[in-house]
Amino acid sequence: MSDIIQLLPDSIANQIAAGEVIQRPASVVKELVENALDAGATRIRILIKDAGRTLVQVIDNGKGMSATDLRMAFERHATSKIRNADDLFTLTTMGFRGEALPSIAAISQVEVKSRREEDELGSLLLINGSKLEKQEFLSCAVGTSIAVKNIFFNVPARRKFLKSNETERRNIFTEIERIVLVNPDVEFTLVENELETLHLPKTNIRQRIVQLEGKGINQQLIEIDEETSLGKIYGYVARPEFAKKGRASQFFFVNNRYIRHPYFHRAVMQAFEPLIAANEKPSYFIFFRVDPESIDVNIHPTKTEVKFENEQALWQIVLVTVRESLGRYNAIPSIDFDREDAPEIPVFDPSRSSQMPRVNVDPNYNPFHQSSSASFRSKSSSLGWDHLYQEFANGKEDEEESDVKDESETQGSLFSSAGENRNISESDLFPEHYQYKQRYILTSVKSGLMIIDQHRAHVRILYDKYLSQIINRKGVSQRILFPEVLELSAAEAAALPSISEDMEALGFELSHLGNHSFGVQGIPSEIGNTDPSQLIRAMIDSSMQTGNDVKDALRETLALSLARMTAIPYGRVLTSEEMLLVVSELFASPIPGYTPDGLKVISVLTDTEIDKKMQ
């Protein structure tokens, strides 16, 4: 029997490695931009075509490569950043595994141009699916230009699992956002389908955050800065009043590397816990500067998971630092004494004398003595109490006389009196539906007492309505007299085109003002006084979180997001007519018992259950 274990060819090994490192076009962007940063680039240009399917090209002004280095860079496990095993524990660069370039070359067509400053000519390298096709000298600028074409062209099974162009485009923006935030001293330009969509000049960290998230975030940011023996923690957190119910911008960076760290995230959330609602999320941009020997970045192929040597101590530092910053910048609500309607606080004047308060006491009063009672009655008569008592006695006599009257006449006079004095109708005194604690609608049914959640019921009603409008494109738009300017982050602006058609069907009218700014010209007529910017952001966040590519699923997400934002909130008092309308429209729905996301709307307390509780 022959041996069955054999060494894999490099081309197959590289394709396997590509499955770990290169998952989508965004992974190519990440690896190439990180290589450009390691090369000392101060200006990076990213070109994308068809959301990276056709082309991903990164051009930098870094130190470039010689002809030999250019060829060696595409050999597996070839790297300029590690010489021995000890170097793994003192890493200061982004890429070090030596797998990215060979993995990219294994599943695409690669063209590389590179030149060092001391060389007169640069080098050209063409690779097609790990196969070297050409290498020659040519004239080019200092730095490196890598063009990756037709990703997964030779692995059709992987290519068909790529998402829609909008989804892949959002993923590219996400990767770019994570890189540019921690490198504000580098100029970045993004060109999509030969149209420049993002330009970020050199700046500081705060302004880089503003460049990405929009001008509105500038007033929200609170600076954090703490240096300890374990390292330095700095960055910004957003004020608690700007916490979001949907997707929030939450970033951790360690030594200029983006990381995911749920443990530290809990520390930030605990600092914000007493200041925000349970379902809200604060934005934060937190940077760690620690000794490279105290962290291990070599535990995941994409290097987004990092192990800290002193995690518990750093957790405490993060918690205390964020809390102190929130307190230092008065994020905790306090009395505003500069308001016009603030209470006037008297100023102490030592020249003015103060009198002790005086209490009038009748020393002769004795509640158990007859003379005292008589004195009390005489005092009460002087206050007019006798007159009140006489009216009460007369009213009682009238009540006794009214007992012999016909019951229907008594009820009629009761309602007429109530209507004259309190403006309350008979339906208000005996309503068909009753609102309990401004949260539930109670109504009697044949089997017992029906309890309806007013907010969830309205979500169900509005969802069916909005979904029908999107499908049938019958949304009614209401023009805004003074259009509102909506500033989106780069990632939000990238996600907007995927839902713009359905938003127009609902009744939203947006005009592009450039630089991720949009003018809100019209809104659906049904949303009333709800903030349109908040609605649009919520729908964009919802589509980004779900990442739906199927049109029907995206429409359902959009309709549900808008329904949640515009539904009757808890705590709102409903009139009898409003409760009647909610109940009637709810039972006109094909699925009245549950919200679109599966929450219970109706519960029935049967007569038997009520009788048991009364025993």
Image (cartoon, rainbow, N blue to C red):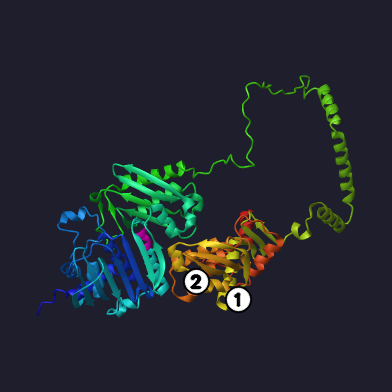
In this image, 230 relative to 406: left or right? Answer: left
Residue carrying label 2: 499
Viewer can see residue 141: yes
The image quadrant where one finds the N terminus is: bottom left
Q: Is residue 546 magenta?
A: no
Task: Residue 319 in the image: state x and y as whole percent.
Answer: 39, 45
Quarter of the image where one finds residue 495: bottom left
In this image, 58 relative to 333: left or right? Answer: left
Task: Residue 212 in the image: state x and y as whole percent.
Answer: 42, 60
Mark 2 vs mark 1: which is more N-terminal?
Answer: 1
Q: Which residue is at 30% across, 67% downward?
A: 59
Task: Residue 252 in the image: state x and y as whole percent.
Answer: 36, 54
Q: Is label 1 in a helix, a strand or a loop?
A: loop
In this image, 530 relative to 421: left or right? Answer: left
* Residue 591 sits above or below residue 347 on the image: below
Residue carrying label 1: 474
Q: Which residues are magenta?
A: 176-180
Q: Amino acid at mark 2?
A: Ile
Viewer can see residue 596: no
> Chief secondary structure of the magenta span?
helix
Q: Amino acid at mark 1?
A: Lys
Toward the left, the furthest residue is 1
Q: Which residue is at 78% across, 59% downward?
A: 426
